Image (cartoon, rainbow, N blue to C red):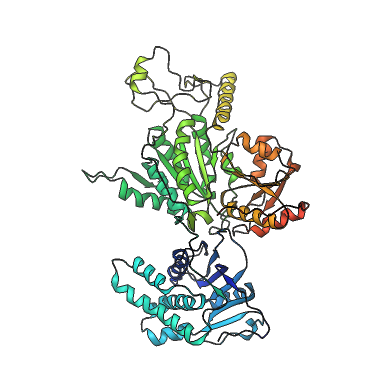
């Protein structure tokens, strides 16, 4: 039986708990932990996994946290109900993290240090290493199968359907059938040991339901890579950096399936690993100038290095797509932790007066859709478009609506004169001439016409016909046109997602990106405590008037963001000329995703309670 002090009430939960795995990096635990998470998914229960790993290659502690929520709350909850601790290096920290009444599963091949004992939680000791020593001769097998043994034990303890686990193993090793039986055997070893030695199931269990629907499990970086393929991208210039590398890997994977000419077998794409980030975006700008759809992916340090070329693309008006998977900064910061801390750097990247279009995805489907949209926006507006995702969304599996694509959709290539249009022109072609009054000029691709439509692209000042000049009035005219184009962009970027509740209009929550799940859960929790709160999810910068109207309509507005300096709030104050005192900060920046409780506590500290009925959002 599990060990627990008398009189302590165990946590009782069905489909509503947090389980955390404490492992050593590089021991093959990722596959086993992922198997556990997918088994919950296959049982129709919404869940949200977080891989918490060190930036060093091997040997340091790593954690894998899974929130199980039948109600569909996918944000990080905080706290741990069930800890699986198989790393002696972090065990003291891990045992402290378990909530009272929770469970602590550990390898008791060696006795537990008495100093780690707590009398308010359940201890479950399983001799994982001893079982492996008895069962396997190979050292690597002992290490790998130890992980599968504790998953098998969890199947018994939490009442996971065993057939689901074996089905997942069969899927994982399809084409390598000889590996299926040994992995299933390791599961059975753990399952049978738990059944024989503990009361199974324990007081925390899972039960099959149908709350997943047609949603899929997907990471944001893969969705970005696939989105770029569907957007018609054929060129990627990049330099590896955590956590963005898998964006390009995803793009390459799908290009190999969808960008090969069926007749000749020739690759219809180019992926170039540059010598650094500056060179990478230089390649993208050159390819885009030449008419290709090109992009790059990076993180905060890369954005810093790319700033000079981003200024060139802005001033020369060359479509450029950049995917920034944010991590904790500044400098090297915490490369494997998440933040939303590149907002100001991306919005105003480069010296001088620059403003860049930003997109803020919240889900893998957003990553797919907004990547495709970024290319249309970049070419329509002839400017850099930067999509700001983050490590939490980019590298973790997320529950997402299915991806979809309309085969009748046509790419928006923007204002581009073709050879026939140039031939018919009697007037002089002006590359930076505002013909339509929207601030967006017409451009041409190189070689379109033998004598017409050519121009010199430069990063120095020029007139409307791309002729070099240092005339101050011509410079001002150009800069004013760029500002007018910025106003035009407000009608093209995605509108915010606003959710109004009964009794709202007093409290408003402004959020963006991966703060979405925690914010929507906080709205429900606040309603249960008598506070009605509307929410506004910002999807893009520049802000359109709906964002400003939302702020103006509420007595107290909170801006929720995962950085220290309230960077989104800074943009709202700067661009919308809002009184800073009217925007209350809710900040979180320890490298882990924000929780609903963090938001709720901050709101409660500021606002008075209203007598309202709790709002139940449709799941």
Q: Is residue 163 visible?
A: yes
Please indicate whether residue 218 sits to the left or right of residue 550 in the image.
Answer: left
Residue occupying image coordinates x 51% and y 20%: 434
Q: How many marks?
A: 0
Please indicate whether residue 508 sits to the left or right of residue 428 in the image.
Answer: right
Relative to 45, say whether 348 is above or below: above
Residue occupying image coordinates x 53% and y 56%: 392
Q: Is residue 280 visible?
A: no
Please indicate whether residue 129 sits to the left or right of residue 562 in the image.
Answer: left
Q: Quadrant of the N terminus?
A: bottom right
Q: Residue 132's spot in the image, x, y percent?
A: 42, 83
Name which quarter of the figure residue 555 lies in: top right
Q: Nearer the viewer, residue 277 or 374?
A: 374
Question: Outermost residue, top direction?
Answer: 426
Q: Nearer the viewer, residue 402 or 121?
A: 402
Q: Residue 134's spot in the image, x, y percent?
A: 40, 88
Q: Residue 53's spot in the image, x, y percent?
A: 52, 64
Name which quarter of the figure residue 88 lies in: bottom right
Residue occupying image coordinates x 37% and y 42%: 235
């Amino acid at each position: 039986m599990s060990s627990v002090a008398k009189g302590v009430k165990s946590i009782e939960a069905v489909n509503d708990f947090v389980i955390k795995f404490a492992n050593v990096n590089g021991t093959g635990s990722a596959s086993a932990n992922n198997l556990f998470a997918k088994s919950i998914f296959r049982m129709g229960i919404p869940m949200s996994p977080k891989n918490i790993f060190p930036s060093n290659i091997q040997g340091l502690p790593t954690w894998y946290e899974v929130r199980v929520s039948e109600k569909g709350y996918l944000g990080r909850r905080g706290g741990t109900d069930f800890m699986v601790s198989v790393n002696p290096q972090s065990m003291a920290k891990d045992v402290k993290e378990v909530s009272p009444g929770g469970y602590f599963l550990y390898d008791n091949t060696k006795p537990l240090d008495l100093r780690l004992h707590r009398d308010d939680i359940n201890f479950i000791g399983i001799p994982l290493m001893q079982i492996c020593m008895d069962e396997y001769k190979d050292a690597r097998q002992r290490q790998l199968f130890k992980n599968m043994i504790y998953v098998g034990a969890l199947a018994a303890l939490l009442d996971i359907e065993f057939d689901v686990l074996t089905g997942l193993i069969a899927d994982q090793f399809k084409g390598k059938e000889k590996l299926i039986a040994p992995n299933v055997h390791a599961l059975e070893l753990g399952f049978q040991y738990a059944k024989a030695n503990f009361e199974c199931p324990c007081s925390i269990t899972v039960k099959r339901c149908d709350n997943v629907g047609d949603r899929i499990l997907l990471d944001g970086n893969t969705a970005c890579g696939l989105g770029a393929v569907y957007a018609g991208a054929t060129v990627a210039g990049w330099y590896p950096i955590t956590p963005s590398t898998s964006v390009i890997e995803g793009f390459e994977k799908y290009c190999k399936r969808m960008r090969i000419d069926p007749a000749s077998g020739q690759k219809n794409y180019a992926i170039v690993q540059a010598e650094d980030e500056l060179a990478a975006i230089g390649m993208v700008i050159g390819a885009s100038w030449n008419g290709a759809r090109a992009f790059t992916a990076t993180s905060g340090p890369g954005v810093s290095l790319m700033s000079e070329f981003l200024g060139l693309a802005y001033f020369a008006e060359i479509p450029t797509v950049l995917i920034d998977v944010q991590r904790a900064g500044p400098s090297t910061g915490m490369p494997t932790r998440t933040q939303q801390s590149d907002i100001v750097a991306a919005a105003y990247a480069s010296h001088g007066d620059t403003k860049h279009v930003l997109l803020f995805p919240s889900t893998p489907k957003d990553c797919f859709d907004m990547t495709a949209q970024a290319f249309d926006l970049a070419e329509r507006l002839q400017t850099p478009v930067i999509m700001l995702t983050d490590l939490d969304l980019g590298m973790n599996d997320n529950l997402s609506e299915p991806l979809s694509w309309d085969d009748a959709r046509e790419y928006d290539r923007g204002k581009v004169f073709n050879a026939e249009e140039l031939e018919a022109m009697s007037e002089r072609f002006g590359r930076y001439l505002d013909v339509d009054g929207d601030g967006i000029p017409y451009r041409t691709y190189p070689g379109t016409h033998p004598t017409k439509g050519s121009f010199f692209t430069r990063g120095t000042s020029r007139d409307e016909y791309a002729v070099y000049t240092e005339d101050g009035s011509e410079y001002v005219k150009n800069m004013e046109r760029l500002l007018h184009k910025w106003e035009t962009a407000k009608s093209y970027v995605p509108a915010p997602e606003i959710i109004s509740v009964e009794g709202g209009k007093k409290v408003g929550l402004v959020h963006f990106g991966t703060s979405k799940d925690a914010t929507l859960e906080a709205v429900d929790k606040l309603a249960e405590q008598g506070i009605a709160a509307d929410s506004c999810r910002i999807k893009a910068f520049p802000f359109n008037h709906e964002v400003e109207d939302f702020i103006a309509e509420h007595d107290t507005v909170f801006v929720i963001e995962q950085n220290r300096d309230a960077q989104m709030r800074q943009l709202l104050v700067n661009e919308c000329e809002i009184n800073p005192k009217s925007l209350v900060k809710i900040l979180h920046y320890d490298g882990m995703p924000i929780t609903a409780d963090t938001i709720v506590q901050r709101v409660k500290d500021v606002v008075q309670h209203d007598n309202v009925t709790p709002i139940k959002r449709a799941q």
